[in-house]
Image (tube, coloured by chain):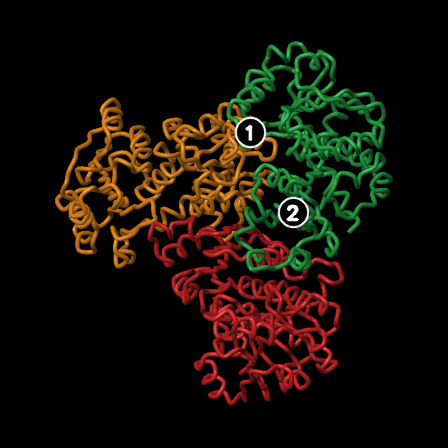
Chain colours: A red, B green, C orange
Amino acid sequence: MDKEDGAVNRFHLKHVYESQQFDRELLDTLFRVADEIKADLIRGDRSRYRLEGKIMASLFYEPSTRTRFSFESAMTRLGGDILTTENARKFSSAAKGETIEDTARIMAGYADAIVMRHYESGSAERAARVSPVPVISAGDGAGQHPTQALLDMYTLKDNFGQIDRLRIVMVGDLKYGRTVRSLCYLLTKYDNIEIVFASPTVCRMEDDIKEYLDRYQVPWSEETELDQVLPEVDCVYMTRIQKERFVVPEEYEEAAGKYILTLEKVRTMKERAIIMHPLPRVDEIPSEVDADPRARYFDQAQNGLYIRMALLYLLLQQA
Amino acid sequence: MDKEDGAVNRFHLKHVYESQQFDRELLDTLFRVADEIKADLIRGDRSRYRLEGKIMASLFYEPSTRTRFSFESAMTRLGGDILTTENARKFSSAAKGETIEDTARIMAGYADAIVMRHYESGSAERAARVSPVPVISAGDGAGQHPTQALLDMYTLKDNFGQIDRLRIVMVGDLKYGRTVRSLCYLLTKYDNIEIVFASPTVCRMEDDIKEYLDRYQVPWSEETELDQVLPEVDCVYMTRIQKERFVVPEEYEEAAGKYILTLEKVRTMKERAIIMHPLPRVDEIPSEVDADPRARYFDQAQNGLYIRMALLYLLLQQA
Amino acid sequence: MDKEDGAVNRFHLKHVYESQQFDRELLDTLFRVADEIKADLIRGDRSRYRLEGKIMASLFYEPSTRTRFSFESAMTRLGGDILTTENARKFSSAAKGETIEDTARIMAGYADAIVMRHYESGSAERAARVSPVPVISAGDGAGQHPTQALLDMYTLKDNFGQIDRLRIVMVGDLKYGRTVRSLCYLLTKYDNIEIVFASPTVCRMEDDIKEYLDRYQVPWSEETELDQVLPEVDCVYMTRIQKERFVVPEEYEEAAGKYILTLEKVRTMKERAIIMHPLPRVDEIPSEVDADPRARYFDQAQNGLYIRMALLYLLLQQA
């Protein structure tokens, strides 16, 4: 029941605003602490890691009940307290023209950590630059959602014991999908990864990510058909295809149909492969798939709790 | 100062979504625990029942500050923690098309109980069917508001020592009034109850409730005049008459006027009779009535705290 | 490390709805407790003043994330719990026509203190009149914002050791600025204060405040130019000039430009003078001024935490 004290001491991040901030050593530390937290909670014990007397402020400039509750549950399970705002955009000084820097400076006087969701890419980093307390991005605009990427990586680690040598297909809206972008950055830290992008033509993965993968020598390929890829991968990472992206309605119907992971398709997957999804899901995974042992998206959401507890502890214990 | 441990062990509900789930034994247990909690709090002590380390999530898809605060105060007074959402409808994954079942599954990973207010009848029951943690309805659409019915019953018990043999008139909008419907279900569990429905023609009690009362041999009658009923009842249960229900404005004026409980009318009531109202009240009870000892609507709201504390404890102590 | 027990016992307020409720003795007590709290927190200790087991309800009928977080952080740092509502106006019984008195009576059953922000002047006082638990105004309409005035006074005391004999210029929108009005009331409690009002013609300080100052023999003057005043004052209290107040756009441009506190202007101020601002600020203080040691507006916001902790403790420890 010892804490990972050595590991904890090597965690040198102050803020979290993009997944590229993490190297393999930081990820290892984070995953080890998350493992211990998960073990405690599953046993019905309270977490051995504690943040009693610390306050986390949720500053959400656009609403995301799931992500907010995940962070707030994490802080509460650590014994800490929370201040919350569901929709600060309309409701706050931002509407009066205050800069994000001013807001961060003031909030830092009221809380020991700031979790920020913002509609503008780069906001969390701007806040971090002036804040004396840790700032954690909970997603910013079309930019990043680093803690989602961390929990995705942790889910891979949790299921396969390690991440090296995995073959992953990312499916759906890869152009606007913040989570798949963040995930790609982190996958480059591991060895012998292979990535397949399977998406309709209108929402293919952007070039900057492809170039980033090339730079780190991660092989990737593009497919428009899902069927021949499924039997060969260790992980199918599904995302939602949004109707709004398509100009021609027929194109949406065709694309959506092609990327629906029916139970029939699931049965072509390897026995030990897993299905992930950042959720919410709509039609792209029918509910009959939920009972298949390869379906791990609810465990994945649950892993978000453990990872965010580990992250909050690691950032705040040194503050 | 012992706890009602025997009683507590006999409480076998997991979720609460409609008042029909309660039988007389469950109500007795609930009321006994509520009595003890009330005694503790009135003495200025903290409750002997504790839920330290447990988390309750308020998932309100339509706003209701009063009901939400009642539940959240209850959880806090038990030593538990809360996650809250004021208006999840616009703000959550629901807007993206996520099913209530998916939401419940994920929230159950973040909290030890889910209190759900929803605009759609049946939502809480759907959530309960998949949730590994207790789901409590805080009102769903035109359907039910079971904890309101529980606190109404507790208020009757609290005032009269028992509930059998009471004569109750329900006044106002009985057609759309969720609270009077839920209350009728529970009154059938007691003996020799008599119910009078006093309402304008456009908002009379629906047939399904009348048939339910018939089936359980609870005598009921309908009146359009309040005056001759008042001196004969033990309880006047007032509800708000909403202008929007009336097509012809003059009909509203007439109806509203008829069902206003003036101080003059109150004085025709029995000395030991009581006036209840689920609140908010507007004009139907003038504020001058508040000082009359028969006015119990503020005590009734306060009883909501004790009943919700008892209910949360009973549902969560076994989880 | 003793508590200011004698002082605490002399604090005889029950509710706080306007700054005129405070006399010099109450302010002294409040500031002494705030000093102790500040010392504890800056040392990294938890506050010696505790409100464990007490609940504060934030009832915000219009949103103000900063003020709400300041109060909620204060209650949390004292060990108390919070119930919160971000925007009760649209979301609450108020929308159904419930009076503020009914709401206060019911909320008082759920919490040990009510912090109320309302869009209507006088609301907090109306709530206070019926509430069995302390009601604290967090700003009401065009009326008052008493805790802002308290933290402003505390900031003066904190910087100068005392408040007597200070010369203060209030700059900007003095007509609609709730904070400068509340501050004027409190300044009359001290000796040999001098106030200069520097504002565009369209938003000059109202006559009622000028008459109040006259009655208490506080000398005041009016200026439209800031430049010759700056070298002579101990404190520049800046406020935001809102475009909406001006009918002619050119007038706004001229006015705004005139009352911008550039670094060049700051350099004409006394070395020991200070710059205050209730925040949010927009253009009226360029960010390059932040590094000047005279800029105290972020400290001022931080003082809000200490003052609100002291106030909550003093109001609740006797309840």
Specify the subunit that label 2 lies on.
Answer: B
| x then y, percent, for residue B130 | 73, 57
- Residue, disc 1: B246
- Relative to residue A82, is residue C16 drawn left or right? left
Specify the subunit that label 1 lies on.
Answer: B
SS under mark 1: loop
Q: Is residue A210 above or below residue B65?
A: below
| x then y, percent, for residue A186 | 54, 78
Q: Is residue B264 above or below residue B181?
A: above
Other-residue count near label 2 (Cα within 10 Å), few / some / many at <14 / 14–19 / ≥20 = many
* Residue kind at label 1, given as amino acid type: Phe
Q: CA distance from mark 1 to mark 2?
A: 30 Å
- The one nearer the camera, C73 or C280, is C280
- The one nearer the camera, A16 or C165, is A16
> Could you tell me if the residues under marks 1 and 2 are in contact, i.e. CB atoms within 8 Å?
no
Q: Which mark is residue A144?
A: none
> At x 44% / y 37%, what residue is drawn?
C117
**Which image quarter: residue B64?**
top right
- The one nearer the camera, A253 or B103, is A253
> At x 78% / y 33%, what residue is drawn?
B186
Number of the front mark, 1 or 2 = 1
Residue C238 visible, this orientation: no
**Which image quarter: residue B73?**
top right
**In the rendered image, residues at marks 1 and 2 fall on the same chain:** yes
Q: Which mark is residue B116?
A: 2
